[in-house]
Image: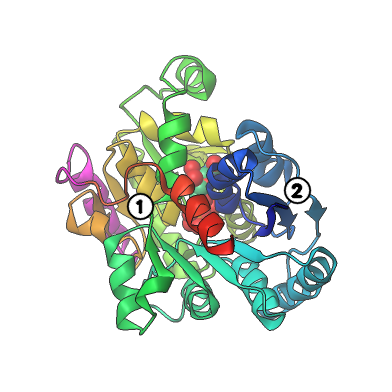
Amino acid sequence: MKPKKILTVIGARPQFIKASAVSAILEQSDELHEVVVHTGQHFDANMSDVFFSELGMRPPAYQCAVHGGGHGEMTGRMLIEIEKVLLAEKPDAVLVYGDTNSTLAGSLAAIKLHIPVAHVEAGLRSLNMASPEEVNRICTDRVSRWLFTPTEGACTHLRREGVAADHIHLVGDVMFDVALHHGARVDESGGLLGQLRARHDVRPGGYCLATIHRAENTDHPARLATIVEALIAFSKDIPVVLPLHPRTRAVLAREGKLQVLEQAVLLLDPLGYLDMVQLEKHAALIATDSGGVQKEAFFYRVPCVTLRDETEWSELVESGWNRLTPPVSSASVLQSLRASLGSAGADVSPYGKGDAARRIVRQLAADLA
Ligand code: UDP
């Protein structure tokens, strides 16, 4: 029998990482055939290409070039491009990941053409409708036929919102699959950490790794200034390493904060996944506003400070691995960073067994047969 066609829509850094796990299993499937569309949301070599090569993914069959502009413009242009591909390819299902504009555009384009949608990372809620990610999650879940959830908590959200039980599939977290597979390839020797150790005072177990890119921080000068001040102060305690997202770099340059930050904190360009994993695994502490990095901190049992008002990964806060710290004053952020150093949380395993991708593919194959 002819394999059923799955059309995957991805476009942002964390989606390449998540999709790498599922694409690898789809590749082995006789029942399903995958066609990948890259929207172009992230397009730099170090925000996109590096993940395809490092994670062993085929180049996308369709490469769009939609990036920049406001949310409406970006999502609208993606809708136009994705619809063209859907009309040409006529897939049996559309697969989307996470909570970006690419997720929303992929799911809307599909449902309008009556193509069923599968959402990986369904059911997450930060309960903050002012964040673009929350809007994207809720709208995508609402139109999805398969809601593949990473945690029990995500299932609870969906049941509470009235999603039919047979559409909810608790599979675990695909990022955990990727971390188990690739995390094992990385140790403290050589690589980027080896270089940083040789050139700077950055030793395994003795530095703080930070990432900042959420609009709620980069688009609010007072919050960004608080984070910058706190990281500069903390760098007097231990070295702070900060791979800078292009958006954050642009805002810091515009606000005249790049130089002062650079004098205290080791600023890097965005990292490839394996370099990032190496720095995460061997950090004493991670400070971030990223969803994925919060979880990876836990996968490698590194304490984490999340510089946000809320998180969709609430189980990490409840288990004590993550300290939620709204960046409202540099003194309180500094206090939280200091208190988290050397801390540990409970022995929990909320993200499944590392076989989420296999479960997703099995379910899709069974339902589309
Ligand atoms: N990441 C990376 N290089 C970096 C920063 C992050 O490879 O310089 C990876 C990180 O390990 C995680 C993912 O990107 O797997 C998280 O993506 P991001 O923080 O951009 O988005 P979010 O998870 O907040 O949606």
Q: Is residue 44 left or right of residue 251?
A: right
Q: Nearer the viewer, mark 1 or mark 2?
A: 2
Quarter containing the C terminus = bottom right
**Image x and y of residue 262, in percent:** 53, 41
The alpha-carbon separation of the residues under discs 1 and 2 comes to 40 Å
**Image x and y of residue 85, in percent:** 81, 65
Mark 1 Cα shell of 10 Å, populated few (<14), some (14-19), many (≥20): many
Q: Residue at x 74, y 78 (%)?
A: 76
The amino acid at mark 1 is Ala
Q: Mark 1 near ligand 1 (CB under 8 Å)?
A: no
- Which residue is labeled 1 in the image? 230
Is 351 above or below relative to 235?
A: below
User: Magenta span has 344?
Assistant: yes
Image colouring = rainbow
Q: Mark 2 near ligand 1 (CB under 8 Å)?
A: no
Q: Is residue 115 visible?
A: yes
Tell me which numbered mark, 1 or 2, is placed earlier along the sequence: 2
Q: Residue at x 64, y 40 (%)?
A: 27
- Which residue is labeled 2 in the image? 60
Q: Is residue 218 visible?
A: no
In the image, the segment drawn in magenta is 325-348
**Image x and y of residue 333, in percent:** 29, 56
**Image x and y of residue 307, in percent:** 36, 59
